[in-house]
Image (tube, coloured by chain):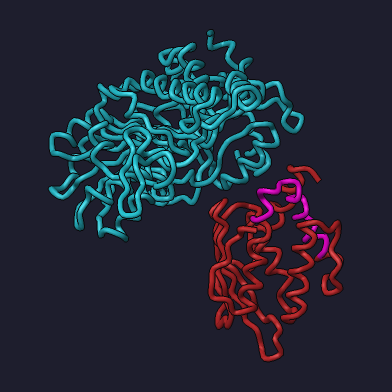
Chain colours: A cyan, B red
Amino acid sequence: MKIENIKKEFPIFDEKIQNNDLVYLDSANSSQKPKVVADRINEFYTKQFSNVGRSVHYLAVAATNLYENTRSSVQKYINAKDKNEIVFTKGATEALNLVANILGQNYLKEGDEILITELEHHSNYVPWHFLRKSKNIKINFAEMNEDGEVTLEEIEKKITPKTKVVAITHLSNVTGAILPVKEITDLAHSKGILVVIDGCQGAPHLKLDMQYLDCDFYAISCHKMYGPTGLGVLYGKKKWLEELPPYQGGGGMIKEVKKDSISYGELPNKYEAGTMATAQVIAFDESIKFMESIGIENIMRHEADLVEYGQELLQKNNSVKLIGSPKNKGGVLSFTLEGIHPHDIATILDEDGIAIRAGHHCCQILHDKLNIPASARASVGIYNTKDDLDKLNDSINNCKKIFNLK
Amino acid sequence: MNLKELYQEIILEHGKNPRNLGKTDDFNKDAKGNNPLCGDNVHVYLKLNGQKIVEDISFEGSGCAISMASASIMTDLIKGKNENEAKEIVEDFLGMIKENPELKSEYLQDDEKTKLMCLSGVKQYPMRVKCATLSWHTLVSALENKKEEVKTEN
């Protein structure tokens, strides 16, 4: 599939949004959905629906096979060693909560330390914060430098003999910095420290190879990968998922239940209690096929071109202040305009049909560090073009005009 | 009213030079408000005299143009009103921002109504209504001596 024609695969771009053609620059928040994904959900509900993993009737068996097919597809897509290392969750947030919870239950001890970074999304901070309360765990922060990066050296500096887990983002949703996750993982492992990666922004935009990366856990958000909402993936090394206790209890995750004893099911059922997001899992297979049909290398090249173009454009624009200038940058352009609050920017851009995000992007620590309450963020996906970024720039100029800025 | 008119009127009038910005000397009532969506923060200070008339009112805060302009306009026209009048004006304003086509309170002069109607443009931007109403909810909280910070969740 040619990247130039990709927009056609997304029906939303045929719609007029408040009489405008849609310029969608909010993919770091959530991506739009190709027709194949939306159709697959409809097809499953109208022609194939059944719950999975329970009944023995035809539809149940067929649905179970479809569900497990996606697990295999994800395994291949991220090059995990074993299919059972793929756990479906209701989102990346739940995936990270799951990891923090099970490590808290049966791995971490009072006084242990967790190292995160100032770049982290709240979902890779708050679940660890719970352990501060319940287990007296200490959280340390690796600092962001002026370019909006967290370096390997900074991580090394902040590791102490008590550090048991390093939990880091793969790609910052604000500065766009791509962290040296492989090097960080190798360093942490050399000191016997576990590595948890928040891959929400990494998975849609970067090549993933779990066996090469060797991290212990990796969280994925499916709705940012052109897939359905309500679905996430937790990759966990088999050794950990086998050793650590379950997260939630309920149907599907048990082996045997007696009045005086309960034994738990094998992987991956052990971590998939209750009826799962069946339709979403099955439709996510289409997202993966869709991304594979374009090729991650092509996606990465296309988005790198867009970011470079957008960065140059905004750098030339007076009064625009870009947040972060990391050497290794993903498809995120966060900025402020002097004298204009980001929400005023977003409202004015919206009037021109341009969808961006304004706020703290669930990264208050990072915004506090920059001493700003909020920022505006344009983020790209495979369907964006240079024309979209030109329109962004024009609309920013419109903002400046309204606010009498030069 | 279109977006440009909304922003231009507000900004010309209050956005760049908010009235009553600061902390009233000898205030005897105050409350804080926070709008998590935009990160708008406002702290309203009141000085009520023995007859429950607002002798002085001011605010401190930071946020988007809509929230700052709204706080500025509010403090301007609440000054000199008594507590009950102030509460009625708040209710009138919130009613207008929500659904009413116009302001009804007899405690508002025509020119004051015109000023407030500048903010009616935010009706078209439901996500931004909270920005316009934050300082008003905070004012009520101050008048009622509530201790908790106002959150614009509704």
Magenta span: chief secondary structure: helix
Is A307 rendered above or below residue B9? above
Please report the bounds of the magenta region as a residue range.
B113-130
Q: Position of residue A108 (x, y in %)?
A: 22, 50
Q: Position of residue A295 (x, y in %)?
A: 44, 12
Can I make out residue A93 in this image?
A: no
Can I make out residue A188 in this image?
A: yes
Is B85 rendered above or below residue A279? below
Q: Position of residue A350 (x, y in %)?
A: 66, 36
- The residue closer to the viewer here, A302 or A110, is A110
- The residue closer to the viewer here, A330 or B44, is A330
Q: Residue at point 56% right, 44% down?
A: A342
Q: Residue at point 34% right, 24% down?
A: A83
Figure quadrant of residue A89:
top left
Queried whether the magenta region covers residue B128, the answer comes back as: yes
Is B153 rendered above or below residue A238? below
Q: Position of residue A33 (x, y in %)?
A: 58, 25
Queried whether the magenta region covers residue A263, the answer comes back as: no
The C terminus of chain B, quarter of image:
bottom right
Figure quadrant of residue B18:
bottom right
- The residue closer to the viewer here, A12 or A146, is A12
Q: Residue at point 52% right, 19% down?
A: A286
> Does residue B124 appear left or right of residue A334 in this picture?
right
- The residue closer to the viewer here, A51 or B94, is A51
